[in-house]
Image: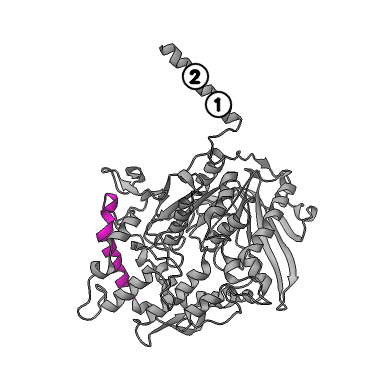
Amino acid sequence: MIEIRARLALAVIALASVLTACGTRPEGAAPRLAAATGASLAECDGLASRLQLANTRLESSAWVADGVVKMGDRSVPAHCLVKGRMHERKGSDGRDYAIGFEMRLPRDWSGRFYYQGNGGLDGAVVPALGALGGGPLTGALMQGFAVISSDAGHSGPQTPFFGLEPQARLDYGYQAVEKLTPMAKQLIQGAYGKGPDRSYIGGCSNGGRHAMVAAARGGDQYDGYLVGAPGYRLPYAALTQIWGAQQWATIATPGATVKNPMNPNGSLPDLSSAFTLQERQTVARAIAERCDALDGVRDGMVQATQACQARFQVQTDVPTCTGERNGACLTNAQKQVVASIFTGAKTANGQTFYSSFPYDTGIAGANWGTWKFVDALIRDPLAIGTIFSVPPTPVQALTDNVTQRLAMFSATNDIYRESGWSLMTPPGEADPTAMRALRNRGAKVVMFHGVSDAIFSAEDTRQWMERLNRVNANPGSDFARYFPVPGMNHCNAGMATDQFDLLLPLVKWVEQGEAPQAVLASVRGAGHPGGANPELPADWSATRTRPLCAYPTVATYKGSGSVEDARNFACQ
């Protein structure tokens, strides 16, 4: 009997091997794509003159020796730097436009291509290293990818006035990615003698938005999407900032001002006087008091984010001032405003148009305050008025009619034939079933988001995942996974383990079928090659690590061992 069972077991193993080799998979399961194979780059200096690409002018190509470029204390391997411009034209405003780009082609290539989606308003060709986060651990170029970076169709300072030019709007929204992607693959083909076997796109903030839009608009172009803090509903998030500024203004110190960082001779209303750093630290401590231990240990980190939202109440868990404000309490008026900000922005008739924000200890982060109190008066009004609105109309942050402005996001006219909402957001965003075709092809999505992101809500990202699940577009989490980062602000910083590499886990998932569940993350303590994070508490180890856990699991203390070591936590 034992011998028969052994033979049957061997037969089952053999059959499984045959089925795997033939590419057979269980019915309904997402396919696994083949792994990339590499090649060597023999020529660089002559590429710019040799390659002829449609609508493209290659300006230069030159070798960059091993070690000339650094990432932290690590040397980037030798590669070829190619610079160029696509679709050079004279804009309707009389200015010269083009999609500027650079590509970095490794001498020893992995067979993979990475589109680096840059953040903010683009406008500059930053080094195509494929890096994410503050002082990153690694990047796509370091891992052997051919990487492209672009200015998304306009150049100059980080100002949004390109949005007055209709085509520049479209290039920024999505068309630059659509134009650059096939060109980059052709350039790779010409350089290595073969095109990329696997293609990836990623970025944080607006770069995360670029990745999500690419997934919805060009699902056959990329195999893996690394989506960080995605502003996939950027117009609404920016308008939420305007709405929030108007709430803060009701409790700010009358007449108080601060310097305008974009105008040395100008000033701004001091919205931070509505909710000072000391008061934010008080709220952060109250959040920790209620929620820190929910993950099994008090360690200054709130891992159980969703449980915390049900447990913490700013009205009752933060001391109420009975006299003068002293930083250790909040007035009733402050509590009402803070609660409304975290609940979510509303129109005049009470309609919520953006998601809530989760309570988290990162509320005390400097980055959180900058976005809420400064950028809400500078960046967001300019972007709303020049890029998202039809017709372009200036925004007065503290007096703009939010309800009327909301309607301008979906408007069009003879000059701006595509609305700001349409050009900025993933088509079919309200219907995640559009992602099914992507899943059925074998593509994967890995998302991450700082729980204390002040501009793009981590709750908005979580809800996108939940919508996928509700329509069965992500069965068994076999297509998309989300990694919230407790304590982290926008893309990095805050009291958080903000150092991690999600690109390699994404590659392993796409090409080897290894789904990521727990990813090691560390702090940027003293001596970190990427620069120390000054906001880390003094009682944290400079080498603290944690597992980032795929939602909905939570990094939970195992009950023994150092709280500075990720090995003593499990995703549960």
Quarter of the image that includes the C terminus: top left
Residue 349 shown left or right of residue 332 in the figure: right
Q: What element carries label 2?
A: helix
Residue 57 lies in the magenta-colored region: no
User: Element at badge 1?
Assistant: helix
Quadrant in which the N terminus is drawn: top left
> From this viewpoint, is residue 502 visible?
yes
Badge number at residue 282 = none
* Amino acid type shown at disc 1: Ser
Whichever of callouts 1 and 2 sits on the residue coming sooner in the sequence is 2
What residue is disc 1 on?
17
Seen at 64% across and 77% down, the residue is 164
Q: Distance between the residues labelled 1 and 2?
A: 11 Å
Q: Nearer the viewer, residue 116 or 220?
A: 220
* Stretch in magenta: 275-299
According to the image, label 2 marks what residue? 10
Q: Where is residue 469 in the image (x, y as percent from the top left)?
A: 46, 51
> Is residue 508 depicted above or below 485 in this figure?
above
Q: Where is residue 361 in the image (x, y as percent from the top left)?
A: 33, 62
Q: Residues within 10 Å of mark 2 (few under 14, many from 20)?
A: few
- Height in image: 213 above or below 220? below
Q: Which of 392/296 is in front?
A: 392
Above or below 331: residue 429: above
Query: Would you identify the image quadrant in which residue 340 lies?
Result: bottom left
Q: Residue placed farthest to the left in the image?
A: 322
From the top left corner, tell me how far across and down residue 16 is, in percent: 53, 26
Look at the image and say whether residue 291 sits in the magenta stretch. Answer: yes
Q: Quadrant of residue 211?
A: bottom right
Q: Say if residue 301 shows up in the picture.
A: no
